[in-house]
Image (cartoon, rainbow, N blue to C red):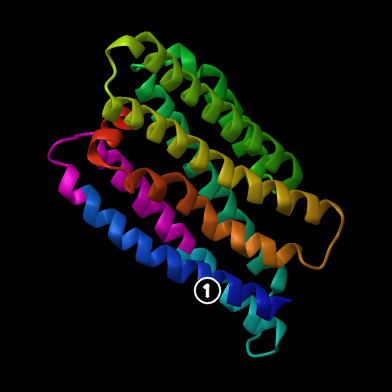
Amino acid sequence: MNVLEIWVAAILYGIYAVLFGRAVQILFHRIRQLERQGILLGAMAALFILSTAQLFVLTVKAAIVVGETQMPLDTVETASLLIYVTSCICSDALLIYRCYVIWNDNRYIVVAPLALLVTSSVFGYMRNARIFQIFSLTTAVFVTLLTVSKVAWAAYEVRMMLSGSLRKNYINAGSAILESGFLYALFVSIHFTVFSRGSSAAPVIFAAVGQIVGDSTDINHCALRPSTANLLSG
């Protein structure tokens, strides 16, 4: 299972690396038009660095298990968990920032999500994985629904003036937000269920989730056409 864990992480990391390179290229092209793309670019870079660190730690863990190196396994597993927690926090923070932008920089709309983020961070760095995942999932789902509702309401308000192409942009924006939020939530839910049941497959799913966290929150956004990205970036 430990060998399979590193294989799954390596395969997903390879896919992530290709998508990350393409996303950076797209963002550099758009950054002159959309100033806030710079914040997205920084968040993407941070998530990619964390994914790289996670792959390295899992490689060390596999080496310890097969007897290739002598290190405390508990220390390596703790490092892996803390990297995962940090990745989730960055991902949730990016979702909250995007929600804040789409709600026209309304500070009050993100008070509850920020409170959830702080709570999940506390439990995460206390290494209480179960409670952390519950709060992180709640944050991701809540913020995703909040953001989609704003896009849907904006489309409803101007529905009489929307041409076919603009209507399609709003649909694409809503779909991108749902995909990026719920893809992450789905895999975390699967890991939470498997982990709670004590399944031996939990480490493998954990390795997959560690790579999917960054992918699900920013690559999907960058794959959008510039006209749709305008809706998501203010």
Quadrant of the rendered image containing residue 24: bottom left
* Span shown in magenta: 28-51
The total number of labels drawn is 1
Residue at x-position 65% and y-position 73% = 5
Q: Position of residue 211 (x, y in %)?
A: 53, 60
Residue visible at 81% across and 68% down in the picture: 200
Where residue 97 appears, as percent x and y from the top left, is 40, 30
Residue 40 drawn in magenta: yes
Nearer to the camera, 185 or 5: 185
Label 1, secondary structure: give it: helix
Q: Position of residue 212 (x, y in %)?
A: 53, 56
200 up-or-down from 123: above or below: below
Horizontal side of residue 191 vs 18, given as left or right: right
**Residue found 79% across the figure and 55% down from its top:** 195
Q: Nearer the viewer, residue 162 or 180?
A: 162
Please identify the quadrant where the C terminus is shown.
top left
Principal SS element in the magenta part? helix
Residue under numbered circle 1: 10
Question: Dot 1 surroundings within 10 Å: few (below 14), some, or many (20 or more)?
Answer: many
Q: From what the image shows, is residue 71 above or below residue 22? A: below
Q: Is 170 included in the stretch rendered in magenta? A: no
Q: Would residue 106 be visible to someone looking at this image?
A: no
Amino acid at pointer 1: Ala
**Above or below 209: residue 227:** above
| Residue 72 in the figure: left or right of residue 34 | right
